[in-house]
Image (tube, helix red, strand yellow):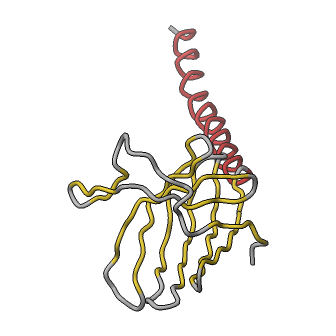
Amino acid sequence: MKKSFKNLLLAFLTIPLAYSCGQRENKQAANNEVLDTVKQCYISSFEGDSATLNLLIIDSNKVEGKLVINYAEKPKNDGIVRGEFKGDTLFVDYSFKIGEGTTEFSNPLALLKQNNDLKLGVGQIETLFGRSYFVKNKPISFEKGKFNFVRTECK
């Protein structure tokens, strides 16, 4: 009886120790994510319009960032991008406001990575249940896009 009680007591005492070791590993994993985050900044211009794109690339493929498009003859678009790389193409959702407006819009964007630059693509978009998507099986043209983002130093 004493032996089984000691074993039971020992088992209960090791559970917190095992739990705390597991927590330490999770903190290390979280720290690794921070180490695997890269900031990249881009600028582009086309016929009087300009754009800045600032990205945080997490674990080499997930992306979050800010995109501001200043149009020469229209109010600016200012918003955030979230998405991921699939091969050499970055697919993001761009949630933005136009000018000083309060209404938020959302569009999908595709950017082709070429060397250190990103080229904005143009594709057919459909909306389903209030969300916009590129139409499946319809090509995205990276030749027709007006913004070619050139990598620049982040400020």
Front one among 17 and 79: 79
Q: Check the image and name the residue furthest to the right.
A: 153
From this view, report whether residue 9 is shown above or below residue 135: above
Q: Nearer the viewer, residue 90 or 123?
A: 123
* Residue 66, image quadrant: bottom right
Closer to the camera, 14 or 107? 107
- 155 on left or right of 62: right
Residue 120, image x and y in percent? Answer: 55, 61
Percent from the top left, x then y, of residue 86? 55, 42
- In the image, taking residue 73 as reference, residue 137 lies left or right, namely left
> Within the image, what quadrant is residue 37 found in?
bottom right
Q: Picture coordinates of residue 32 (x, y %)?
A: 71, 46
| Image x and y of residue 149, in percent | 66, 67
> Among all residues in the image, which is located at the extreme left?
129
Q: Vertical placement of 35 versus 146: above or below?
A: above
Q: Residue at x 74, y 66 (%)?
A: 151
Residue displayed at 76% across by 71% down: 152
